[in-house]
Image (cartoon, rainbow, N blue to C red):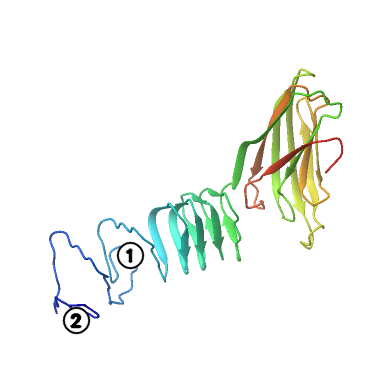
Amino acid sequence: TASTSPITGAVVVTGGVGVAGALNVAGITKVTSTTASTSTTTGAFVVSGGVGVGGAFNAGGLVTVNAGLTVAGGVLNSGAIFTTTLDASGPVTAHAGLTVGSGALTANAIFADTIAASGGFMATGPVPAGGSANLNQNWFVQRDFVQWSGTAWDGCAQVHIKTNIKNSWAMYRFLIEGYNYVNSADISSIVVGYLFSTNGVAGSFVITNSAVFDRGTGATTAQYISSDGFVVVRVNLGASYYSGFSASAWQVNPNGLNAPITTSIYNQCTNL
C-alpha cells in the first residue's frame, strides 16, 4: 500500500517508533514536521552520526557546517553558506552569501553576493561577487608559475611576459629569477605596481605606484600596458643564449586580480 501522508500506507503508527537496528527504506522518505533547526541536535530530522548521500543534496534554507566541508563536485545553494573550511573541486554558488571561518576556502569558481574568508582563499576560476569580498589573509602567492629559456643567439633578447591583468584595480608583485649564461650573471628582479583607473572605463587604466628593482646584473626589467590593455613585464637579457628564468607572483594586497595570474611569453624587440 502506497503512503501519501503520515496516516496512509502499509504500516501506520500514531505514536513514536524506536528502532534499535538498521532501517532500510526502498521508497521515498518524507518528514512533514516543520520544526526549525538551530543546532546539530534540533530540527525535524536529527542524525547523531554521519550522513551519506549518493545523489544531489538541495537545501532551500541556510546551510551551516561546524567542521570542514569537502565537495568532490560543485555546490549550489539558494541561501547562505557558513562553514569553517570549504574545499570543492567544482564551482561554489551561494546566492545569499558565503562565509568561511578560520579554515581555507578552495574552489574551482565562486559565485556569491558576498564573500568573507578569514583563512586562506584560492579559486582556480572566476570569482564574481555582487556585493563585497572580505579576505582577511593573503590572497595569492604563485611560485615559479611561468618559466622561459632560450638557446639561440638573439641580438634583441627581450622577453615580454604578458599577464591577464586588464581593466582591474589590481595590485601585484613579480619576482624574476634565473641565470644569464652569456653574461655569467644572476637574474634577480622585482616588479611591483597597481593598475588603476578613476572611472573604471576600459582603456583608462594606468600603472601607478610602481617600481622595478634589478638586484642582479643578468637582466633589466620594465613594465608597461600592451596595446590591448594588459600588464606586461619586459625582461631584457642583453643576450639570451642558454639563459633562463622563472617568474613568481604575489597578490597579497587588499586589491587583487581575484583570479590566478596567467601569462603568454613573447620574444621580440618591440613592445606588444
Residue type at mark 1: give it.
Answer: Ser
Q: Residue furthest front?
A: 1
Q: Residue at x 67, y 44 (%)?
A: 262
Sequence order check: which comes first, mark 1 or mark 2? 2
Residue type at mark 2: give it.
Answer: Thr
Q: Is residue 67 left or right of residue 186?
A: left
Please, is residue 13 above or below residue 75 in the view?
A: below
Pick whichever, 99 or 268, lies toward us: 268
Q: Residues within 10 Å of mark 2 (few under 14, many from 20)?
A: few
Across and down, in percent, residue 60 comes to 42, 71
Q: Give me the disc on residue 8.
A: 2
Q: Is residue 91 left or right of residue 25?
A: right
| Disc nearest the viewer among 1 and 2 | 2
Q: Residue at x 52, y 48 (%)?
A: 120
Across and down, in percent, residue 68 comes to 40, 52
Pick whichever, 97 or 211, lies toward us: 97
The image quadrant of residue 4 is bottom left
In what element is the residue under mark 2? loop
Q: Which residue is drawn at 74% across and 22% down?
A: 242
Q: Mark 1–mark 2 contact, CB under 8 Å?
A: no
Question: Label 1: which residue?
Answer: 39
Q: Residues within 10 Å of mark 1 (few under 14, many from 20)?
A: few
The image quadrant of residue 157 is top right
In what element is the residue under mark 1? loop
Measured Cα–Cα span from mark 1 to mark 2: 31 Å
